Image (tube, coloured by chain):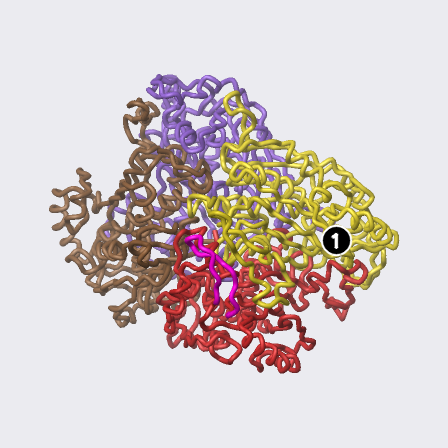
Chain colours: A yellow, B red, C brown, D purple
Amino acid sequence: MSHNSFGHLFRVTTWGESHGPALGCVIDGCPPGVPFDLTLVQEALDRRRPGQSRFVTQRREPDQVEVLSGVFEDDRTDGLKTTGTPISLMIRNTDQRSKDYSEIRDRYRPGHADVTYDQKYSIRDYRGGGRSSARETAARVAAGAVAQMVLDQLFGNVAIRAGLVSMGPHDAEARDWDVARQNPLLCPDATAAKAWEAVLDDARKSGDSLGGIIEVECTGVPAGLGAPVYSKLDQDISSALMSINAAKAVEIGDGMQAARLSGTSNADEMRMDGDKIVYQSNHAGGILGGISTGQPVVARVAIKPTSSILTPRRSVTAQGEEVDIVTKGRHDPCVAIRGVPVVEAMMALVLADHALRHRGQVGTFVR
Amino acid sequence: MSHNSFGHLFRVTTWGESHGPALGCVIDGCPPGVPFDLTLVQEALDRRRPGQSRFVTQRREPDQVEVLSGVFEDDRTDGLKTTGTPISLMIRNTDQRSKDYSEIRDRYRPGHADVTYDQKYSIRDYRGGGRSSARETAARVAAGAVAQMVLDQLFGNVAIRAGLVSMGPHDAEARDWDVARQNPLLCPDATAAKAWEAVLDDARKSGDSLGGIIEVECTGVPAGLGAPVYSKLDQDISSALMSINAAKAVEIGDGMQAARLSGTSNADEMRMDGDKIVYQSNHAGGILGGISTGQPVVARVAIKPTSSILTPRRSVTAQGEEVDIVTKGRHDPCVAIRGVPVVEAMMALVLADHALRHRGQVGTFVR
Amino acid sequence: MSHNSFGHLFRVTTWGESHGPALGCVIDGCPPGVPFDLTLVQEALDRRRPGQSRFVTQRREPDQVEVLSGVFEDDRTDGLKTTGTPISLMIRNTDQRSKDYSEIRDRYRPGHADVTYDQKYSIRDYRGGGRSSARETAARVAAGAVAQMVLDQLFGNVAIRAGLVSMGPHDAEARDWDVARQNPLLCPDATAAKAWEAVLDDARKSGDSLGGIIEVECTGVPAGLGAPVYSKLDQDISSALMSINAAKAVEIGDGMQAARLSGTSNADEMRMDGDKIVYQSNHAGGILGGISTGQPVVARVAIKPTSSILTPRRSVTAQGEEVDIVTKGRHDPCVAIRGVPVVEAMMALVLADHALRHRGQVGTFVR
Amino acid sequence: MSHNSFGHLFRVTTWGESHGPALGCVIDGCPPGVPFDLTLVQEALDRRRPGQSRFVTQRREPDQVEVLSGVFEDDRTDGLKTTGTPISLMIRNTDQRSKDYSEIRDRYRPGHADVTYDQKYSIRDYRGGGRSSARETAARVAAGAVAQMVLDQLFGNVAIRAGLVSMGPHDAEARDWDVARQNPLLCPDATAAKAWEAVLDDARKSGDSLGGIIEVECTGVPAGLGAPVYSKLDQDISSALMSINAAKAVEIGDGMQAARLSGTSNADEMRMDGDKIVYQSNHAGGILGGISTGQPVVARVAIKPTSSILTPRRSVTAQGEEVDIVTKGRHDPCVAIRGVPVVEAMMALVLADHALRHRGQVGTFVR
């Protein structure tokens, strides 16, 4: 069962509400002997952290991570290393301002889980969205940083890089992942990144919000990860990305456009370069029949516009009254921006899990 | 672990290769006392069966299903009923023509799992694609029919209906699911269905193939199925649909288009009708925060064009030689057509599993 | 979830009722490239098969196994090999005599699952015990034979040998596993085996039955299998053996007697032999802290006396009437005898699963 | 996978090393709306806590539990309640004295996981046994207290009571569970409890230790929990109890003695009392065919004598030197005593998990 866990051999369980005392994750199945660098976890969290520019929520959470178990160092281990036991990571919540949410306790915000959560469980920590808050993704990002350490240990050069490639109706053209790390919109196209700032300011000022599309590219993934039927690599990527708050679609490779192609144009032809297979294109996004090809793994996820907006929307209360709702508070005008490091983390989790599963069943990795 | 299983409480494991003696599935966790009608399983298989029109592969498989366990009838049970034990369903393979595939034993067909399967496992039943063949979906369709029986027992009126809504660059406009059951393209738009016949004939005659998009709508799904984090209903739908052969993208509700909307236009506003919440739109596709709203659950999956085409494509052999490959044999010019009943089956599996999981954790269903 | 599955990476799902058309199993996660010998599966089934001596049930089932998927042979694979896909094994039921059971349809046999199964599921295939029949263990034995092939491939010399070491109040002294394969009581002590024949004849003639204890020893198991907390090797052995019909207790190493020892006498002291650790005793049964030591893994399981006896016992019916029950039919006077190959099979399943899990998490095996 | 998790629908994952910063657990799948009383968790921990009498380790840990998520209270929930999200419980380690263990860093203590853990993982937090320490059971006890709250909510009167029924070669006769809570040996026989104090003092003074047997009885368990094949209630109890540190055997009902009985004497005969089935005995320990009968569920677990003793034992070092080892430090002369609340906790976990699983598959409970 997996209400709050993700993965099989490299398995992450997250816990915590937006306005509870803390949130965190337990990573079970991490191989022993992996060099563990807590600063990498903290850096990943810092990239996701709110309050870093005017384009994201002004909630201020230092998001200081603490490692509670699963790593060890003595003079013989040459630095902190994983031990093969569960790695427990915790982040205390500090800037909670629960009062912000008191007035919407019974008012179901359109686009939010308020109404469905209440219908399912009949009880709800409504403060800040409780368990349904995007704050849960901090735990994913922390776990993803550990997954990346495992990938580094196993394969050496797996690079997982994401960025915002569409914002509202606007599309980026370039895919320069270094650029994506250098602008506040995390967009891999410097020109678009610049132009979109005004678009986003407009949305925010008019009390509205925008959706966006995040693209992720993973290089250095060996051929052979995945399985033909219900553990397809693309299936698990799809599950991972769709589990992110506000996700509404996932694409692998050409994605929706693949349905519009003919068989001749969609084929990724192959040639040899010495004893190495070289694909002439990558419509498939690095996955054939559910198994990685060795090409870059490419996926995209569509994030809907932030539901918390200042424009009044018609809604109802828990008591069945009709109301108009305006969601005040500190909200991202385009949540897709802060989704970028979350997408990277989820990809790392999928790849680390599949790497261990492959090793378990097959034993060795394809060079 | 789930290499060949899908679901948790209602769990299906499929087995079988395209040209082995048989294929089938084991359904574990089916509730006891559910009326079991084998003719419904057979009818579902008949809808998926090849050889029914010139638009699908001419391979002829009677696909006669046999139930081997898990159901019982005596004069007191009033017809065949499930007993709560594993339901084993088997379909013998009869029209295998393994010779068709002998010449491509070492020749990797572009777009197929041939190369990646070999790279992963180093051994492969290459006949007809082996385990990677779309023939595996017969087992899914059989299991899906049983899942539908469970949904009928639990909720009475869950209708899961899919159809081909795009073929190549062409889009259907109407969504008449009855129409979708009456034309060979399984398209819910009668006009498009007619027009697309010529398009598909052209593709086939020119040795090419077309992709397509399948849409599915599930009505009668109660509010409350799913969970906020890693068992989101949309996440599991995404996993289910992406596990179908040739799938490259999955959308929930507005899907990719949601990313292009503003927050004000994306919000599904709510009003009351008596003590019932009535949504003013369904951009969300019936799911908020990973939990069903009670509105129709709507999803789409993009299917790439059939990779087996008569137009030569450049490829390589297992021995590292460069070759040109033409895939002869009996192939679907648009595999998306035969994917329609598979999509319906996967949706039934996801809903039945979530219904039991909800009952386990929460105990009662939301009216 | 695991209602009918056992194991994680090497995962077996069994299905089938005693008097349904067939029974079988699906093995998921078997590594690819393992030489597959169907005659070894058949031989294991033959050892378990009823009707082989006057000491076991006279039901005659040829128990002919059929392999339906997951193995492949061509001129290049050098014999039949596993492919890494699910291995489906099926045994048709042939000698069912359902009439034998008609009169006990509503009469709850003491010691049987009749009453509890009815209370749980409200519907029951009562013929021969249905899913609760020991006939289900045929599927375990078939799967265990495949697990043994995996162990042979991975480790070369894992020998799993069991025998009946107590029958009723009588204890065997010798542990000669070759002897256990040569007498109809499967007892590793030739003298006891001979003496017990009369005891068993007496029990049978007086309409009674006897319990027994099965011991199993696994040699060649490398150090390092298992895990410290909830995947302890002894925990999973315990689960495996207690899942066998009529099992009431499981012991590892000294078992219950360990509780009666002092710390000084229970310690398995260690010395070096070259660079190899040599234990001076094996009170622990080859497992320390849930992880194998490299010593022989030793376990025992207590099997209660056959519940189906000719001596009348007081019971009740499904309708709440008080009755006296005599269980006619073809029953084993000591079911523990036929449990011996089942115990061997379950041990092979546990070891194969843990071997793959270790390989997945840690990567290499301890020499 | 379950390296550090236990259960399926009610699933507990524990984390933490003996001398790390903290330990804890995450409970996933707990139903919403269950009244949550943290003092009950603390009381359970206090019963397990070291340092309470001269018969247990003098390590002093306040074992103060903190709840970090999954519960909520406002003026409408009428006290703290579970919300259906993961419940994270944490206990800080305070009295660690890591220096105690420095000299045995490389010296493998006989009977401990030191050697096997090293062989498996090649790296080890040796301080106090790290993850293999019995300190991990604090997390189980905390989780078990929550499981008990769920059982109270579902069934009202499930009482789970355990005690020490054998110590070394000595057996208790009485089974007065109230008495078991009132003496420092947690023995349900007041006379034995008194007599054993001297025995235990002797063992401790002579630098030795004693094993023991814990018996647990669960009353109020409804009929119908469990399943016929690989989710037998007794199988999961067996797995639960064998996962406890130092456990070497598990018995259900008559346990090992069942193997020594004849079929006539082992049968639990049935009579009617009104419309209720009344069993005339309980050899089966409340479980038939893997499913609860409604009688008290009775199990026993054998705990080996504490391995940490002051009497020198021969052993080896990680470097392959032969040494004699004396385990100083603060150790329990009979760890079975402190195992009593752990056994109760594990039983609660098994029962809560099976209750939810039954509800998921079957829907209602048997009255």
Helix, strand or loop at mark 1: loop
- Return the x and y of residue D36 as percentages of the image width and height: 62, 45
Q: Which amino acid does label 1 sit on?
A: Ala
Specify whether A217 is left or right of C252: right
Q: Quadrant of residue C118?
A: bottom left
Image spot of residue C81 (x, y percent): 33, 54
Numbered range of the magenta stretch: B310-326
Give the left or right position of residue A45, taking residue B155 as reference. right
Q: Is residue C247 above or below residue B175?
A: above
Q: Quadrant of residue C365?
A: top left
Q: Which residue is drawn at 44% across and 45% down?
A: A360
Q: Nearer the viewer, residue B85 or B332?
A: B332
- In this rendering, is residue B161 above or below C129? below
* Residue B284: quarter of image: bottom right
Instruction: Let me know if residue D195 is in the magenta part.
Output: no
The chain that hosts pointer 1 is A
Along the line of sight, the residue nearer the viewer: A6 or D41: A6
Q: Identify which residue, A204 or B288, lies in the foreground.
A: A204
Q: Is residue C246 visible?
A: no
- What is the crowding at mark 1: few (fewer than 14 residues within 10 Å), some, or many (at least 20)? some
In the image, taking residue C112 as reference, residue B247 lies left or right, namely: right
The relative height of residue B74 versus residue C316 in the rendered view (above or below) is below
Q: Name the residue under label 1.
A: A172
Decide if residue B214 is in sight here. Answer: yes
Instruction: Tell which of D105 and C130 is nearer to you.
Output: D105
Percent of width and height locating residue A48:
71, 42
- Percent across and percent down for residue C159 are 26, 42
Residue at (55% x, 31% y) in the render: A35
**Tally of numbered tags:** 1
